[in-house]
């Protein structure tokens, strides 16, 4: 739907949740006020403030943020939850999540109310945007990095359920990105900045121009953005696997090799590492299991563990280029045609430590690695006998080797987004009332390819380590030496190290017809309506490399996925005026909406909404709503094939906490003294074609008070005070049970409910962990938003304003299908995300002639986490409970100084800013998978960032 906006709407302040009632009343009384459409309703109306809370981030707010990504900007609002961004170094570290969407490497998404990115609908000018694909699955959310910031006029964030208005996904809210329509001048903007540590350089270049005449208007914009990487090794926090623990929680796959085996000649159980600097280690069987060794080996200790953290990235590199055009042609006085088209390319990189070889069943990975025999006649085998991982004579539990010689794993993504939309809009008169109509068609595709450097062919690894005759039968085979650091030659690497190439694509085709206008004039005002039809078809596919499909890939397993679905929808919305100019009701309106959706995959769903808007007086506005919502399972969730997810899981049977756990582990077949060799456990995930849609019920109550005593006074030009309460109840949530929780409950209860799908080998290691999607449990959350917006009078010394927005999360509860409460809740950090009880943003702005100064404070309340493997270290504060750690409350400060003049060109603005001006460090996170902090909640370590922006109007 193409939407037009008046100067009045563009004047809304960016942080204002509610517009002042007295201004709205004046607008309603003004003749010939243009009707506009505001996110949350399809009805064109004169009132900007509807029945639902909409936060508007205008261009001034965007520029003051100092950020270059739509996603980064939205993630800073107080209602935002934990969402993916470019501080997540995902590929190679996490594997495939259960939802079939892949890791989304290089993408930036949005989460509202902590309900997940899949439960937020993203629109561009009121039309759905295509879901992301990052060549690791079929994504079910929008990558906001596919939408260039250069084309954005403002961002409207509806913080309420809206499925009856927009359909599936709008459970937590809607983000509607409004694009620039026309510009009679050319503008060039350049921005450069970097962290004060001297890294993470960021550059932006934007060029836009437009024009118009009586019949035609156009707007064209091109942009380029480049963000450079920041290495984890360049910050002390992220330079070790877990802060404050050294390498004790590092990997047991080490550069020299770790060999856990039984000598078949002596029966000695050994856990050996070649000594440093030895290129051809010699083994003395006469030493038996002794650790007082005189040969070229020593017994493995935690000091031998590998520090994989130094290879990771704190900030991933990201390049984006885009070209956008919008054309409008007036076909007649009451009919116009439009065309919008965009091409966006993203090039991004993730990096992980060199890919380890985990050979043997103590740390199961894949068929070839689990069933390798390191042959006695391998010319580099120092032991003189076969090391057999499975079958008769099995004596090898683990050979863990970190091949630094092959370099780090480097995952390079290229993502192309194409979008084209066209349609017509106009108006006609029926029974003396204006009726507005529009017809729309849109097609978009998001196509990704990922090249993976630094991984290995597990079948060739098996051949190169196996019997010499087998290797010699392959003319390309070179026997492999994994005994000692630096032992792998270039010729060996050429045989076992391929380039792995994966690809994926999402497509969206959309057609819609909409009508809106007034039906009849009632005593309290016009009875207004909006109705329409929409058809959408989604198509998605993921094609992993043939090496992966054949099972020869040494990394995380995955299989191809493809599927499609379509939906037909009808909707009706009414705005019913009940009272006007009555006692205690200057205006009282009722809104009703219902939407019918018919899906090709599961059937139909109907959702409805009721809202009320009550203007008591010029000073007080009340509103509330009740709405039903739903989210249809997406292609990845329905059709996702079996894929691996390397979850960081602490096995309770490794160092059992008490005698009960010890006994239960014994029942599960875990031998006494079992030690988990690898902190990552392979979990097999996949889609489920029998999934039903999620359903939800949402409630919202709000009030805004704009006191007359604070209007046009010597100390106050205007004061708005707002409060809003929300509650969401989600049932049939599509998710897999949290893997750590499932394993804990299995060991604690021995119940088949939790133990089904988890199996162990004879060494006690988990060799199978199935964790597929189902409609399980429910999510309930509630809270409050508070707003204070104060504008002081303009004076000789300038004008001052304050915008303060605070979100309080009252409750957050997740229950599985058995009614068992999951660990995610208010004030808790778990699974690389947290739900702060309080989040608050305070922005102070001062304008004086050509100068403007802004100061923003971003506050997050404390969180509590389990220390996990770091529980025995001093860094675990054991606060408030033993084994837990407190992430203290945090405030980041941002400042910007701008100067504007019309004396140069047609206009020039220079801005100098510093984000995190005091260099505040995020709290240490011991449970987080990477880099020692939560990148979805906090700025990264060493994140004081300066930038300079110049904007020229020609």
Image: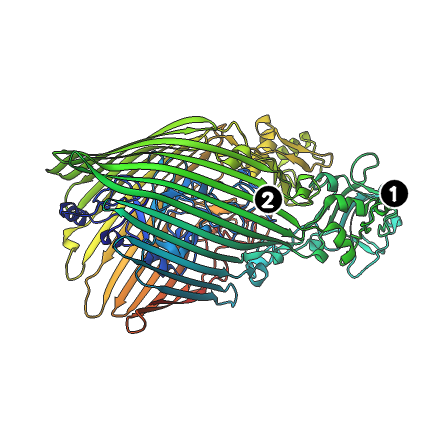
Single out the residue that lies furthest toward the bottom: 903
**In this figure, which residue is indicated by the disc labeled 2?**
95
Q: Quadrant of the N terminus?
A: top left
The reply, left or right, for residue 837 in relation to residue 675 is: left
Q: Position of residue 911 (x, y in %)?
A: 36, 67
Q: What is the distance, in whole Å, between disc 1 and disc 2 at their CAs?
A: 40 Å
Quarter occupied by residue 667: top right
What colouring does the structure picture have?
rainbow
* Mark 2 crowdedness (10 Å alpha carbons): few <14, some 14-19, many ≥20: many
Residue at 49% from the left image edge and 57% from the top image edge:
320
The reply, left or right, for residue 864 in relation to residue 454 is: left
Q: Quadrant of the C terminus?
A: bottom left
Q: Nearer the viewer, residue 39 or 726?
A: 39
Q: Position of residue 720 (x, y in %)?
A: 22, 51
Badge 1 marks a residue whose secondary structure is loop
Q: Position of residue 192 (x, y in %)?
A: 45, 66
Q: Position of residue 840 (x, y in %)?
A: 35, 52
**In this figure, which residue is indicated by the disc labeled 1?**
266
Residue 937 seen in the current view: no
């Amino acid at each position: 739907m193409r939407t037009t906006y008046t100067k009045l709407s563009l004047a809304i302040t960016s942080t204002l949740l509610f517009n002042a009632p007295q201004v709205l009343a004046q607008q309603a009384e003004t003749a010939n006020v243009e009707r506009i459409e505001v996110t949350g309703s399809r009805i064109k109306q004169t009132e900007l403030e509807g029945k639902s809370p909409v936060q508007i981030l205008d261009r001034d707010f965007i520029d003051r943020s100092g950020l270059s990504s739509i996603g980064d900007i939205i993630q800073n609002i107080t209602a935002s939850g934990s969402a993916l961004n470019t501080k997540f170094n995902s590929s190679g570290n996490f594997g495939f999540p259960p939802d079939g969407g892949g890791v989304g490497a290089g993408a930036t998404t949005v989460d509202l109310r902590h309900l997940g990115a899949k439960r937020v609908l993203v629109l561009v000018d009121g039309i759905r945007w295509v879901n992301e694909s990052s060549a690791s699955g079929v994504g079910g959310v929008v990558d906001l990095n596919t939408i260039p910031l250069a084309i954005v006029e403002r961002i409207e964030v509806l913080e309420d359920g809206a499925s009856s208005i927009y359909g599936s996904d709008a459970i937590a809210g809607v983000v509607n990105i409004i694009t620039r329509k026309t510009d009679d001048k050319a503008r060039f903007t350049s921005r450069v900045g970097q962290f004060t540590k001297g890294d993470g350089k960021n550059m932006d270049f934007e060029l836009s121009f437009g024009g118009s005449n009586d019949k035609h208007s156009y707007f064209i914009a091109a942009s380029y953005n480049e963000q450079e990487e920041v290495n984890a090794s360049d910050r002390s926090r992220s330079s070790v696997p877990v802060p404050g623990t050294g390498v004790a929680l590092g990997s047991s796959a080490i550069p020299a090799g770790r060999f856990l085996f039984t000598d078949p000649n002596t029966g000695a159980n050994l856990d050996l590492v070649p000594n440093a600097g030895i290129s051809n280690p010699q083994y003395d069987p006469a030493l038996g299991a002794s650790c007082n060794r005189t040969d070229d080996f020593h017994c493995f200790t935690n000091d031998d563990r590998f520090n994989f953290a130094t290879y990771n990235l704190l900030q991933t590199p990201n390049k984006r280029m885009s070209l956008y055009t919008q054309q409008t042609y007036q076909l007649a006085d009451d009919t116009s045609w439009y065309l919008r088209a965009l091409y966006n390319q993203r090039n991004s990189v993730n990096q992980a430590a060199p890919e380890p070889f985990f050979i043997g069943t103590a740390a199961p990975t894949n068929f070839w690695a689990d069933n390798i025999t390191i042959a006695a006649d391998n010319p580099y085998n120092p032991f003189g006998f076969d090391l057999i991982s499975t079958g008769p004579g099995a004596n090898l539990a683990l050979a863990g080797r970190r091949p630094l010689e092959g370099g780090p794993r480097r995952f390079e993504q290229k993502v192309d987004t194409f979008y084209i939309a066209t349609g017509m809009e106009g108006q006609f008169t029926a029974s003396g009332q204006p009726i507005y109509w529009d017809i729309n068609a849109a097609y978009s595709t998001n196509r990704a390819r990922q090249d993976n450097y630094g991984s290995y062919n597990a079948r060739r690894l098996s051949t190169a380590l196996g019997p010499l005759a087998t290797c010699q039968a392959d003319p390309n085979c070179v026997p492999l030496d994994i005994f000692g650091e630096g032992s792998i030659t270039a010729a060996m690497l050429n045989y076992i190290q391929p380039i792995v190439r994966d690809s994926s694509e999402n497509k969206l085709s959309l057609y819609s017809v909409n009508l809106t206008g007034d039906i009849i004039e009632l005593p309290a005002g016009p009875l207004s309506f909006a109705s329409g039809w929409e058809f959408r078809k989604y198509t998605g596919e993921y094609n992993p490399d043939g090496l992966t499909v054949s099972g020869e890939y040494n990394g995380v397993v995955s299989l191809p996925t493809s599927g499609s679905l379509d939906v037909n929808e009808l909707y009706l919305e009414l705005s019913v005026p009940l009272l006007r100019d009555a006692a205690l009701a200057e205006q009282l309106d009722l809104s009703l909406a219902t939407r019918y959706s018919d899906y090709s995959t599961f059937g139909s769903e109907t959702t409805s909404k009721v809202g009320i808007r009550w203007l008591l007086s010029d000073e007080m506005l009340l509103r509330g709503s009740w709405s039903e919502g739903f989210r249809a399972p997406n292609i990845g969730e329905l059709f996702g094939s079996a894929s691996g997810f390397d979850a960081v899981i602490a096995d309770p049977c490794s160092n059992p906490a008490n005698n009960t756990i010890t006994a239960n582990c014994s029942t599960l077949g875990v031998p006494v003294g079992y030690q988990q060799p690898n902190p990552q456990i392979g979990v097999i995930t996949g889609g489920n074609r029998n999934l039903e849609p999620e359903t939800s019920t949402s409630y919202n109550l709000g009030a805004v008070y704009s006191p007359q005593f604070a209007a046009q006074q010597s100390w106050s030009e205007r004061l708005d005070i707002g409060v809003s309460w929300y509650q969401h109840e989600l049932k049939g949530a599509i998710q897999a049970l949290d893997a750590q929780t499932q394993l804990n409950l299995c060991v604690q209860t021995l119940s088949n409910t939790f133990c089904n799908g988890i199996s162990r080998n004879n060494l006690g290691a988990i060799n199978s962990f199935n964790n597929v999607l189902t409609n399980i449990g429910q999510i309930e959350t509630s809270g409050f938003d508070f707003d204070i917006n104060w504008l002081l009078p303009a004076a000789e010394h300038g004008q001052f304003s304050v915008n303060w927005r605070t979100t309080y999360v009252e409750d957050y509860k997740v229950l599985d299908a058995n009614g068992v409460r999951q660990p995610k809740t208010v004030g808790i950090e778990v699974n690389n995300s947290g739900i702060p009880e309080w989040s608050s943003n305070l922005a102070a702005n001062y304008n004086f002639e050509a100068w403007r100064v802004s100061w923003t404070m971003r506050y997050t309340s404390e969180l509590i986490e389990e220390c996990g493997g770091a529980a025995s270290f001093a860094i675990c504060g054991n606060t408030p409970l033993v084994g837990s750690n407190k992430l203290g409350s945090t405030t980041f400060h941002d400042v910007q100084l701008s100067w504007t003049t019309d004396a140069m060109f047609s206009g020039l603005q220079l801005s100098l800013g510093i984000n995190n001006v005091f260099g505040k460090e995020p709290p240490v996170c011991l449970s987080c998978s990477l880099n020692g902090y939560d990148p979805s909640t906090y700025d990264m370590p060493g994140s004081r960032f300066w930038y300079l922006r110049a904007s020229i109007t020609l």
